[in-house]
């Protein structure tokens, strides 16, 4: 990276931290610290909600996913706008009416203390572990491409986030996220325009779309129903709806964002803004990945995008074989490029039959190219059995570093660091709130002063920040842990959502019934997870459904329970 | 519910109309309608380039 890039990267990071601390210093009470004095306008809430969900992995992995698989991933977000409407219409008015600090506080008024504590504990367990991964996942990629020590990258991101989150609480998180989101969207928009402008002069935008379409990268919507498909419109609307309902309606890292709103209306508008913009935003990020794919049809791509891992093969006894594969890949690229140019000429001349014939040839050449990449990945494994052979996450960042002009590289790194910081700050803020309000204040020290709880919230923010940094530093020592933690979220989300839906919509279900239902449902989810191969996203639906069915069943069994007032 | 912390001073204005489209119901339909339009556009895109 050039000096200009470093200045832009560190200038952005310093600005965010200093702004966050300066603008929000001196929260004098717990309400100001955890709910930003209910002062947030809808656009701040909307941007804050979007920035919380957009982690660094969103910007690193999503374009790579489109490069690899096309744009079908956008269907995963089709349930989100529906969830925004449901949360706005149902969840928000109830939270506001009860003036809660956390989502779990509501469960005590609706059910009882044990249901509140159980749900808060499930949240702390999964979000506490996730907070470490939110820092670790981008750090492993950034430290590789920037040639930094992993622990340095982890501590840099973690320490910056802790600084302003501890200082300004929810207000600092939301105010900084406004600018972080502007940096993210501005940076990605410029990157999108740049990648299209970097295509060869003779290739029009229409030609680029033809190339992408021929390679199955523009299959955005899949109407066929299959449980095996990872992404189709049906799983996107149903699974995506349950996941988004659980995330936006019951996960404190999101609930805290809109509970800081000036009124019910401001919070609703913020969420509906997310409902309007999220799908187009994801479409755009995926589209950048598709354009990067088109770019690499005209300019030689690396045979393996993780240069550091490839370097290990270069320095091993497999170097000659790698060299041969790279030569074969270069030959394949030249042949394919000539065929693509021929196809575009035929299409533009209206010679459909000729174009179809060339398309078949291109398909064969693409398959040969992929086979060569598979051979390289096998070579990587042969050289280092522990090495990661999936290089999808490195596609976009490699493109950025090798092709974008000076200054823009720094801006794109600022986008990725901003995304890591924005989602981490929300997590630490929510973990501290839940620990303070639902556990410490409710069960340990019930009669402290306002200042005492304010200081406790700050200490808990530091504590969760240290746990996240420590976890991220040592996560690489535990191979399968990251995948397990990602799955863990879906194992708990369904049960938590089921408890909330029972609370909102099934008025005659009481505390003991829902508590027993939650325990049975969670046990069954874990049992199903241990014994059957079910796509983990489906556990959101299963867990939620089981809680609702069992809570009705238990309520009928113990129907005589006295109604809580 | 734990009421020991002083309640927030937020305005409970769930019945206030939104700044545009007069009712919240209309705004909800805008979000759902936007989703439907996007799905239709994405379907056309998929069909055009499949």
Image (cartoon, coloured by chain):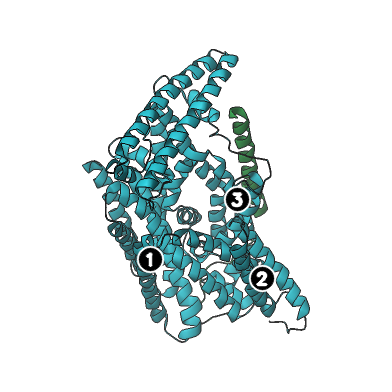
Residue A90 place in picture, x, y as percent: 64, 62
Q: Quadrant of residue A521?
A: bottom right
In the image, the chain rendered in cyan is A
Foreground disc of the pair 2, 1: 1
The residue nearer to you, when weighing A506 against A390, is: A390
Q: CA distance from mark 2 to mark 1?
A: 34 Å
Q: CA distance from mark 3 to mark 1?
A: 34 Å
Q: Quadrant of the C terminus of chain A?
A: bottom right
Residue located farthest toward the left when viewing the structure as drawn: A3
Left-right relation of B1 to A19: right
Residue annotated with mark 1: A471
Discs 3, 1: same chain: yes
Q: Are marks 3 and 1 in contact (CB under 8 Å)?
A: no
Q: Earlier in the sequence, mark 2 or mark 1?
A: 1
Q: Are marks 2 and 1 in contact (CB under 8 Å)?
A: no
Residue annotated with mark 3: A81
Residue A307 place in picture, x, y as percent: 32, 42
Left-right relation of A324 to A106: left
Residue A428 in view:
yes
Q: Quadrant of the N terminus of chain A?
A: top left
Left-right relation of B35 to A327: right
Q: Are marks 2 and 3 in contact (CB under 8 Å)?
A: no
Image vertical order of residue B22 relative to residue A113, above or below = above
For label 3, the crowd category at 10 Å Cα-Cα, with few meaning under 14, some 14 to 19 and many 20 or more, is many
């Amino acid at each position: 990276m050039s000096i200009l890039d470093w200045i832009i990267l560190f200038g952005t990071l310093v600005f965010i931290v200093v702004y966050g601390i300066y603008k929000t210093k001196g929260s004098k009470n717990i309400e100001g610290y955890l709910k930003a004095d209910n002062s947030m306008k809808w656009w701040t809430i909307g941007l804050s909600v979007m920035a919380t969900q957009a982690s660094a992995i969103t910007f690193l992995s999503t374009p790579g996913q489109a490069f690899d698989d096309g744009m079908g991933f956008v269907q995963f977000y089709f349930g989100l706008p529906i969830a925004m409407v449901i949360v706005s219409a149902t969840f928000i008015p109830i939270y506001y009416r009860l003036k809660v600090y956390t989502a779990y506080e509501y469960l005590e008024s609706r059910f009882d203390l044990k249901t509140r504590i159980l749900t808060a504990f499930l949240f702390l367990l999964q979000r506490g572990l996730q907070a470490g991964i939110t820092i670790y996942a981008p750090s492993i990629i950034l430290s590789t491409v920037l040639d930094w020590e992993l622990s340095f990258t982890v501590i840099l991101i973690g320490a910056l986030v802790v600084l302003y989150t501890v200082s300004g609480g929810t207000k600092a998180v939301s105010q900084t996220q406004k600018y972080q989101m502007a940096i993210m969207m501005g940076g990605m928009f410029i990157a999108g325009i740049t990648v299209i402008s970097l295509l060869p002069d003779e290739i029009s935008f229409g030609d680029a779309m033809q190339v992408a379409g021929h390679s199955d990268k523009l299959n955005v919507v899949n109407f066929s129903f299959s449980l095996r498909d990872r992404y189709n419109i049906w799983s996107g609307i149903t699974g995506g709806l349950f996941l988004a309902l659980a995330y936006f309606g019951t996960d404190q890292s999101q609930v805290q964002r809109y509970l800081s709103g000036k009124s019910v209306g401001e919070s609703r508008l913020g969420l509906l803004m997310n409902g309007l913009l999220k799908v187009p935003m994801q479409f755009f990020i995926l589209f950048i990945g598709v354009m990067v794919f088109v770019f690499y049809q005209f300019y030689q791509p690396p045979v393996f995008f993780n240069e550091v891992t490839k370097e290990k093969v270069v320095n091993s006894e497999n170097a000659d074989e790698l060299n041969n594969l790279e030569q074969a890949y270069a030959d394949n690229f030249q042949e394919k490029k000539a065929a693509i140019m021929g196809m575009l000429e035929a299409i533009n001349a209206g010679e459909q039959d000729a174009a179809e014939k060339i398309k078949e040839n291109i398909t064969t050449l693409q398959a040969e190219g992929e086979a060569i990449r598979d051979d390289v990945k096998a070579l990587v494994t042969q050289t280092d059995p522990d090495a990661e052979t999936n290089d999808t996450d490195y596609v976009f960042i490699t493109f950025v570093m090798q092709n974008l002009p000076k200054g823009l590289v720094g801006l794109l790194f600022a986008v990725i660091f901003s995304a890591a910081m924005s989602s981490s700050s929300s997590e630490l803020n929510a973990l501290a709130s839940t620990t303070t309000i639902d556990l410490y204040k409710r069960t340990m020290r019930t009669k402290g002063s306002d200042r005492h709880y304010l200081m406790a919230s700050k200490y808990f923010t530091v504590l969760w920040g240290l746990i996240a940094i420590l976890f991220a530093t040592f996560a690489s020592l535990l191979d399968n842990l990251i995948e397990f933690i990602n799955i863990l979220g879906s194992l708990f989300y369904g049960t938590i959502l089921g408890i909330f839906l029972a609370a909102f919509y099934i008025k005659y279900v009481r505390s003991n019934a829902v508590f027993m239902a939650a325990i049975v449902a969670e046990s069954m989810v874990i049992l199903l997870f241990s014994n059957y191969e079910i796509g983990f996203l489906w556990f959101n639906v299963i867990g939620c459904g089981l809680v609702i069915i069992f809570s009705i069943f238990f309520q009928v069994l113990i129907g005589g329970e006295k109604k809580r007032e | 519910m734990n009421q020991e912390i002083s309640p927030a001073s937020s305005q409970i204005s769930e019945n206030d109309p939104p700044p545009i489209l007069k009712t919240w119901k209309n705004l909800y339909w805008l979000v759902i309608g936007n989703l439907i339009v996007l799905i239709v556009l994405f379907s056309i895109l998929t069909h055009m380039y499949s």
